[in-house]
Amino acid sequence: MKKSIISIFISILILGSASTTFASGNTTSSLAPIRAQDILNLMACKDKKPEEQIKDRTDGTKVKCGDVMKKTASSHPKGSNSGGGY
């Protein structure tokens, strides 16, 4: 009896976590993954020119904003950046 309760609990846990992954769309995302370091640097370069340098947010090195924008350009979808489709 005890083994069957444990096995039912484990199967519910496994099925529940798998359905959450499928519902979130992580398995079929067409966007390229971006490191958190690149996202932070992109936010810091938001109002800067491509030739300006910033201090990296995680390791403290100097990086050019143009290099950061090139790294993250492949992850942006083509088309409008407005966020709405209407």
Image (tube, rainbow, N blue to C red):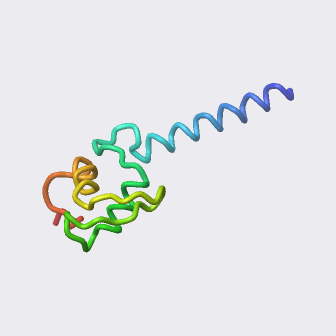
- Residue 69 point in image, percent of width and height: 24, 57
For the view shown, which residue lies furthest in the bottom direction? 47
Q: In what quadrant of the picture does the C terminus appear?
A: bottom left
Picture quadrant of residue 64: bottom left
Residue with the most extreme left position = 79
Q: Nearer the viewer, residue 22 or 74?
A: 74
Query: Residue 5, position in %: x, y?
Result: 79, 32
Q: Specify whether 82 is left or right of 41.
A: left
Q: Residue furthest right?
A: 2
Judge whether 48 appears above or below 30 on screen: below
Residue under the point 20% across and 69% down: 49
What residue is drawn where x is 51% and y is 44%?
Answer: 20
Question: In the depicted view, which residue is nearer to us: 29 or 7?
Answer: 29
Left or right: 26 in relation to 15: left
Residue at the image position 46 percent from the left and 60 percent from the top: 60
* Position in image of residue 72 (x %, y %): 27, 52
Say above or below: 78 vs 11.
Answer: below
> Of residues 13 and 51, which is closer to you in this image?
51
Q: Quadrant of the N terminus?
A: top right
Give the residue furthest to the front. Answer: 62
Q: Position of residue 3 (x, y in %)?
A: 82, 25
**Residue 79 versus residue 44 in the image, above or below:** above
**Which residue appears at 40% of the width and 49% of the height?**
35
